[in-house]
């Protein structure tokens, strides 16, 4: 299993800001890493540098301690899967899977029987043996994506790079493919780096998360650590659905005040702060509750198993999750309580975290 190390890597294409700025992280052998960030964050640039399609201006990229700087792309033994399927329309699934093994750089390395065995093995792993004699035009979107993934895996690469491979699929199929990707990666044990704008991918798949925005890595860590202990407001906004509440408050020598409520938030510099709380941590009631502040329901969205209720409290919108069917109709009164132990506190001027919620 290969360990990928990126150290101090930067890349500029001549614009006002670098595409990647001083990026460092280590992805352990057999781990599933996810680079998550919005469009333009630098995700594809990072993958292209690892694959050798783009050269970094500074820094070093290594696999198992060996520098890739002087290794041309075709000799790196790194496979990359893109958002588009990159399948040959006139070739069957079987021939598409065979193609990477018959490429000039690998010609003569495997016999016909070995190639057939590799294809059969990958088809079984991807659960597509019944599709081997079909053309790409006869496949669904999810089936095409599996074949595209198979073209990368059949080579048994040292490292697998996935560039938004399921972004274009519908929500149900994305969920299914997410589960399959995790299963396949675990079965094969291939070190994998996956780029996506979807925070759900990061939370569901990652052993290691790199939160990337404007070319900078705002935080690197496990999915649980990044979610529970966001380094700043940017990271807090990136992970979590429904999105975290970010409310304006003020800190003094003894605590934090937000929405007219006062909390003991430990020692810290006085001044404006941003208070974060996950919607699932907000306590919502349709009846007056001791310690809660009154508001009015703006909107209630039903997600099946729960509702997301938007409540106006003194001009601020607070999102709270509640069991499906709670009587929270638009315009009706509601009361929200922010448990002190569940609050994140960020410095408003810089966005950096001052305090995290307690993990239960």
Image: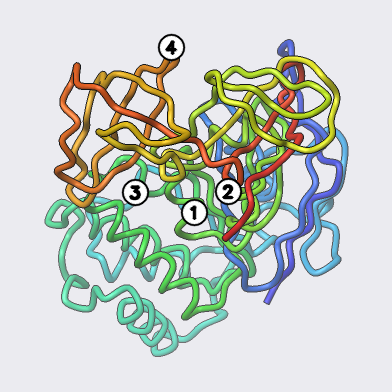
- Of mark 1 and mark 3, the one earlier in the sequence is 3
Q: Which of 175 and 22 is in front in this view?
A: 175
The reply to whether dot 2 and dot 1 touch (C-beta < 8 Å) is: yes
- Whole-angstrom CA distance, mark 2 to mark 1, is 8 Å
Could you tell me residue 205's position as x and y percent? 48, 60
Q: What residue is disc 4 on?
A: 314
The image's mark for residue 85 is: 3
Residue at 43% across, 25% down: 293
- Whole-angstrom CA distance, mark 3 to mark 4, is 50 Å
Question: How many residues crowd mark 1 within 10 Å: few (<14), some (14–19), many (20+)?
Answer: many
Could you tell me residue 235's position as x and y percent? 62, 36
- Whole-angstrom CA distance, mark 1 to mark 3, is 25 Å
Callout 4: SS: loop
Q: Which of marks 3 and 4 is in front?
A: 4
Q: Nearer the viewer, mark 4 or mark 1?
A: 4
Q: Quadrant of the C terminus?
A: bottom right
Could you tell me residue 59's position as x and y percent? 87, 42
* Residue furthest front as drawn: 290
The image's mark for residue 227 is: 2
- Whole-angstrom CA distance, mark 4 to mark 2, is 28 Å
Residue at 42% across, 82% down: 118
Question: How many residues crowd mark 3 within 10 Å: few (<14), some (14–19), many (20+)?
Answer: some
Q: Is residue 194 left or right of residue 63?
A: left
Q: Nearer the viewer, residue 100 or 313?
A: 313
Callout 1: SS: helix
- Of mark 3 and mark 4, the one earlier in the sequence is 3
- Of mark 2 and mark 1, the one earlier in the sequence is 1
* Quadrant hosting residue 106: bottom right
Callout 2: SS: helix
* Quadrant hosting residue 255: top right
- Whole-angstrom CA distance, mark 4 to mark 1, is 33 Å
């Amino acid at each position: 299993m290969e360990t990928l190390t990126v150290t101090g890597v930067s890349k500029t294409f001549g614009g006002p800001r670098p595409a990647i700025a001083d990026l460092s992280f280590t992805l352990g052998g057999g781990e599933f890493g996810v680079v998550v960030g919005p469009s333009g964050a630098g995700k594809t640039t990072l993958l292209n540098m690892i694959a050798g399609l783009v050269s970094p201006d500074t820094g070093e990229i290594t696999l198992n301690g060996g520098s890739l700087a002087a290794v041309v792309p075709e000799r790196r033994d790194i496979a990359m899967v893109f958002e588009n399927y990159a399948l040959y329309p006139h070739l069957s699934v079987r021939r598409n899977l065979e193609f990477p093994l018959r490429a000039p750089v690998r010609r003569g390395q495997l016999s016909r029987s070995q190639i057939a065995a590799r294809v059969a093995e990958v088809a079984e792993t991807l659960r597509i043996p019944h599709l081997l004699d079909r053309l790409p035009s006869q496949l669904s979107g999810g089936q095409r994506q599996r074949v595209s993934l198979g073209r990368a895996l059949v080579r048994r690469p040292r490292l697998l790079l996935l560039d938004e491979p399921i972004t274009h699929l519908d929500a149900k199929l994305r969920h299914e493919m997410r589960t399959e990707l995790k299963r396949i990666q675990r079965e094969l044990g291939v070190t994998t780096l996956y780029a996506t704008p979807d925070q759900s991918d990061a939370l569901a798949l990652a052993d290691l998360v790199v939160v990337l925005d404007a070319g900078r890595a705002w935080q690197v860590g496990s999915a649980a650590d990044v979610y529970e202990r966001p380094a700043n407001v940017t990271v807090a906004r990136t992970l979590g659905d429904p999105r975290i509440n970010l409310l304006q408050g003020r800190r003094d020598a003894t605590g934090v005040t937000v929405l007219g409520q006062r909390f003991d938030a430990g020692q810290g510099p006085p001044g404006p702060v941003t208070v974060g709380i996950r919607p699932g941590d907000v306590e919502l009631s349709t009846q007056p509750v001791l310690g809660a502040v009154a508001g009015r329901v703006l909107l209630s969205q039903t997600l099946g198993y729960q509702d997301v209720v938007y409540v106006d409290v003194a001009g601020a919108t607070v999102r709270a999750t509640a069991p499906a069917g709670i009587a929270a109709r638009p315009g009706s009164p509601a009361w929200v309580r922010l448990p002190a132990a569940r609050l994140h506190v960020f410095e408003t001027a810089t966005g950096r975290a001052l305090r995290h919620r307690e993990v239960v």
